[in-house]
Image: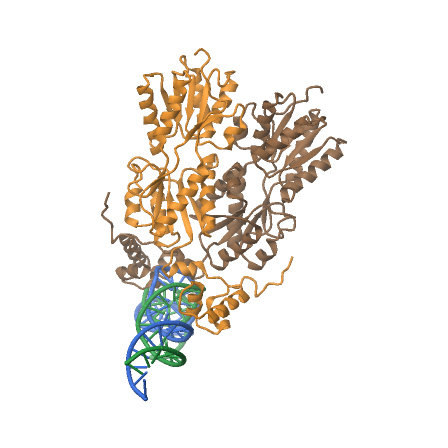
Chain colours: A orange, B brown, C blue, D green
Amino acid sequence: MSVPAPRAPGRRVTITEVAALAGVSKGAVSLAFNNRPGVSAATRERIFAAARELGWSPNQTARNLSGRRAGIVGLAICRPARLLGLEPFYMEFVSGIEDVLAEHSCSLLLRLVRDLAEESALYQEWWRGRTVGGAILVDFHRDDPRIPPLRALGMPAVAVGHPSLTGGFPSVWTDDASAAAEAVRYLAALGHRRIARVGGPSGLGHSGIRAAAFEATMAELGLDGGRQVATGFVGEEGARATRSLLMSPDRPTAIVYDNDIMAVAGAAVAAEMGLSVPDDVSLLAWDDSQLCRLTHPPLSAMSHDVHRFGAEVARTLFGVIEGTHRGSRQVPTPSLTPRGSTGPPRRA
Amino acid sequence: MSVPAPRAPGRRVTITEVAALAGVSKGAVSLAFNNRPGVSAATRERIFAAARELGWSPNQTARNLSGRRAGIVGLAICRPARLLGLEPFYMEFVSGIEDVLAEHSCSLLLRLVRDLAEESALYQEWWRGRTVGGAILVDFHRDDPRIPPLRALGMPAVAVGHPSLTGGFPSVWTDDASAAAEAVRYLAALGHRRIARVGGPSGLGHSGIRAAAFEATMAELGLDGGRQVATGFVGEEGARATRSLLMSPDRPTAIVYDNDIMAVAGAAVAAEMGLSVPDDVSLLAWDDSQLCRLTHPPLSAMSHDVHRFGAEVARTLFGVIEGTHRGSRQVPTPSLTPRGSTGPPRRA
DNA sequence: AGCCAGCCGTGAACCGGTAAAGTGCCGATT
DNA sequence: AATCGGCACTTTACCGGTTCACGGCTGGCT
C-alpha cells in the first residue's frame, strides 16, 4: 500500500528546481520546454534530463496566467441535470468532442447552467479568468440573448446550429430542413397522408427549422393531414404525445420524432396499444444511435453520425483558436436509413 | 449585431483597476471578495460598487496559482470515446455529479484516456498544475495500477467502487454482491434453474464481485445451470452473447445483464428469435434507466438511482477536499424492480 | 586589430491574484 | 502618561511559469 515516493509525497516540483539541477536559469528551461531557439542542443538535453529526474512538467495554471491559452475547452449546457442524463445525443456528441480533444491533450470543461443569463456570465468568467481557450455553444434559440455579450467578449467559440441562428459565430451544422423534407417525402411515397411530427421545444432553433420544413413539404405535396407536437425531448413526453396522437379519431399513420429516445418510447406506446409497427403506424426516429438498432422492429431513422459531428465541432474550434478558420462548416445531411419501423400504411 | 461593449471588447479587467477605482489597495479588494475580516462595511461596499462598475470578477487562474483550491473537479474515463457514447450509465452519473457541482459553482473537467498509465500521468499533471481541486476515480480493477502513484500524489479523490478495490481511497459504493444474490434468488424462486449472466469485463472490480456472488448463490441454491459470459458492456456484445446463450441446447430460461443497454439488446434478440419474454426467457437488467421502461415489455431491473449515486460521489468529494470526510459511504443497494420481462418459466 | 553579427543564456519584470507581516490610529486599561 | 489590543488597511513576498531587453563570447570579414 505504501509507496517509495520519488520525493516527498505531494510535493510540487517547480521550474526553479529543474533549472538549478541543470545548472541554468528558469528562462532557459522555459525556452527548452517550448521548443524555442536560444538554447544549445547540449543544454537542452541537460534540461530534459533534469526534468525527467525530478518528474517535472510545466504547471498549466502558471502557464495560463502568463498569457497563454489554456488547453481546456468549455461546454455549457442549459437544462436541468436530470434531463441531461436521458439524452443519448449529448453523450455521443461529447464523446466525439473528446476524441479530438484527446489528440491535442486537451480536456473538456463541462458545466450545467440553469438559464441563459447564467450561461453568459459563465463564459465571461471562463474567458476573463483564462480558464478556457475557447468554447462550444449549443442549443441556439431565435434571437439568442447569449450572442451580444459573447461577441463583446471576443472568446474563440464555435456554434452548433444553422448559420442563420448563430449570430455570426463560426458554426457547424447539418441541413435539418432538407432532412425533414426527405423524411416527409419518403413517408408520402410509401402512401402515408396523415403524418405527424413529435418535435422539440418550439423556441429551439433547429426544432423550428425542422417544423417549418415539415409544414412546407406537407403543403407542397398537397397533404393537409400534418400535425406537430412540441415536447421537451424526453422519453415520457414522447410517449404521451404518441399516445394522444394515436388515440385521436383520424390518427396519423406515420410519426416522425425529433430524437431517438422519443421514438423508442413511441414504439413502446404502439405496442402497448396493440398497434403493429409498421402496419398500423410507421415510426421514424432522428439522431440515429445504437438504440434504434436494438429495438424490435429496429427503428428507421434520419441517421446522423453524432460522434463525428462532435469531432468536427472540436476540430473547427481548434481552427478558430489558431486563427486558421473562420466561417461555417456543414457536415453531411442526416440520411434516411430505413429499417423495420416504416412501411406502407395498411389500407394503402 | 455590434454591441456597445462596456469597455474595450475582450479587455481583461484586473483587481488593480478595481482597487484604484475604489481608492484602496489590491489586498483590500481581495479581502472583501473573500468575505474576510479586515475591511469595514463602508469600504466593502465601495469595493463591490467599483467591481460592479467595471464588470470585474476574480480571475480563477490567478487564484489557483496562489495556493487556492481550483473550483474544478476532474474525471478521467479510460476507454475509447466511441464506446462512451453508448453508455447511459455514464451520462446519468455525470449528470448527478453536475447537479452537486453546480450548487458549488464548480465545473467538471472530463477527459478520456487510452490506458491506465496515461490516466495516472494525467492525475499528476492535474494535481501538480493545480488544474483541479480533486478527482473522481472510476472503474477499479483488481490490484489497480493507478493506486500507488495516486496515493503518492496526495490529491483529494473519491473512488467509485467497493472499498476492497479502491486501495484506501474514500469510496462510494453499492452492495453489488447482495444485489446479485437477490437477482439469482428471485429468479430461482420463480422456478428458474438454468440462469445465465451476461457481465462486464472480468478484470473490472464490480463485474468480478457480481460474478462471484452469482456463482456462490447458484451453488448455495443447489443450481448447477449457471453460466456467465464476459463482455465489453456494449449493446452488440450483449446481443451476441444472448444469441449464443439462446441457441445452446440447454438454453437458460433467465438471463441477468450487467447493464441496461445489453438487456435491451437481449430483448431484441429474443424477439428476433421468436422467443416470448418472459414465457420463454426472462430478462433482468441492471442500472435501471428510463430505457428499461420504454421497451415492450418493460424490463425488470436491479434498479439503482445512478443520478443520485453521482451526486453522492460529488458530495463526498467536497467532504474530502474540505477535510471533513474520510472513509467510505454506501448508497442503497440496487433493488429488484419487477416489470414485464421476468416471470415463471413456461414448463415450471 | 577592430568591428559587427549571431548564438546562448541571464535577470528582471510581468501575469492577477492570495497571505502574512507591518503600519497608523483609536479607545480602553493600569 | 505609557502600554496595549484591535481594527482597518497597506506593503511585500510569493504562486510558477513566460517574455524580452541585455550582455558575454565566438567567429568571420575587412
Q: Residue at x 39, y 16 (%)?
A: A194
Which of these two is toward me, A116 or A160?
Answer: A160
Could you say where residue C14 lies in the image, as x and y percent from the top left? Answer: 33, 65
In this image, B127 relative to A218: left or right?
right
- From the viewer's side, name the closer residue of B321 and D20: D20
Provide residue B314's location: percent of width, then percent of height: 51, 46
Q: Quadrant of the N terminus of chain B?
A: top left
Q: Quadrant of the C terminus of chain B?
A: top right
Q: Give x and y (percent) for residue B103.
A: 44, 45
Relative to A51, say whether B252 is above or below: above
Q: Residue at x 29, y 59 (%)?
A: B18
**Which residue is more in the foreground, D2 or A139?**
A139
Note whether A278 is above or below B286 in the view shown.
above
| Residue A204 in view (yes/no) | no
Task: Using the rendered image of the protein, determine whether residue A45 is visible from the camera's viewpoint.
Answer: yes
Q: Is residue A305 above or below residue A34?
A: above
Taking the view exactly as shown, the residue that stands out farthest to the right is: B222
Q: How many marks?
A: 0
In which quadrant of the rendered view does residue A310 lie?
A: top left
Task: Give coordinates of residue B265: x percent, y percent.
Answer: 57, 30
